[in-house]
Image (spheres, rainbow, N blue to C red):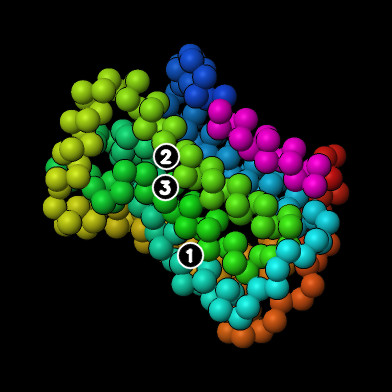
Amino acid sequence: MLTLGGAAALFLLAHLLPAAPGVRPRLVALLGERFYLAAYSALSLALLLFVAVAAIRAPAILLWTAPAWAHVVPLAVMPFAFMLIGAGLAAPNPLSVSLSTATFNPQAPGVAGVLRHPVLWGFGLWSAAHIPPNGVLGQAFFFAVMTAFAVAGGRRLDRKRRLTLGPEAWAAIDKARRASSPRCLFEKRTLLGAAIGFFLYAGFLAYWHELLFGVDPMQIGSGGQPAAPPAHASALTARFAVRTPFF
């Protein structure tokens, strides 16, 4: 559990440091906007995997036995989570997380016209949907922390954007994007991002989830019973653990 706590602390620190006064502008000036966003995204994903592997390798203390329906929840929710994350990252959004540097049009805001923080909503759905089927302490702790992080992240981003944009500009953008037509969901970048997200979901469902975490979601979701929590999620995570001195 100490390793899991340390991994979670590193993940949190990586998201708090750029919010410190002057840190992000200096990094952007040094690296450039696009490279900074790409590097920060890669670091976030790597740390997220680090926390996930630490959760898998934590002591197997059973908190609850998951009923059969609990394993269907992620299968039903995850397509929407992936599509929200993909659409949110692909479309410009000055109010939240985005990888796009295109000019934001409040009259055609994409998925931001429906949700101010689509990426955080996607991560929140992902983590919350995985709580019911994961009754082991390490995994339950991991997904609960990620859910809380997604919820708190939206509020923190609102405060941060109000400061950087100015309260009046922030309110004007927020009002305009909320007044947009539901057709904003069919904006080109939003559709492209959602399509990429769905294909990534299909890849995880068919192959990557079992490769990374040692669990076949299709087998469990169709009624198969999961084995006892594995000490090593898969050959890949085992190799990762051996090469990582924190394990």
From the image, tell me which residue sits under label 3.
Answer: 119
- Give x and y (percent) for residue 212: 68, 60
From the image, tell me which residue sits under label 1.
Answer: 78
Q: Residue at x 37, y 37 (%)?
A: 96
> Which is nearer the N-term, disc 3 or disc 2?
3
Instruction: Give the structural element (helix, strand or loop) at label 1.
Output: helix
Instruction: Decide: few, some or many residues near mark 3? Use Cα within 10 Å; few <14, some 14-19, many ≥20.
Output: many
Instruction: Give the structural element (helix, strand or loop) at label 2.
Output: helix
Q: Residue at x 52, y 25 (%)?
A: 18
Q: CA distance from mark 1 to mark 3?
A: 13 Å
From the image, tell me which residue sits under label 2.
Answer: 154
63 is higher (above) or lower (below) than 241? below
Left or right? Give the position of 76 relative to 242: left
Q: Residue at x 55, y 32 (%)?
A: 15
> Which is nearer the N-term, disc 2 or disc 1?
1
Left or right? Give the position of 125 relative to 107: right
* Furthest residue toward bottom: 223
Instruction: Give the structural element (helix, strand or loop) at label 3.
Output: helix
> Which is more toward the observer, 62 or 161?
62
**Region rendered in magenta:** 1-16
> Which is more toward the observer, 191 or 70?
70
Toward which corner of the image does residue 63 lie, by quadrant?
A: bottom right
Toward which corner of the image does residue 205 lie, by quadrant?
A: bottom right
Amino acid tagged 3: Val
Q: Nearer the viewer, mark 2 or mark 1?
A: 2
Is residue 15 highlighted in magenta? yes
Amino acid tagged 2: Gly
51 is higher (above) or lower (below) than 158? below
Residue 218 appears in the rendering: no
Residue 22 appears in the rendering: yes
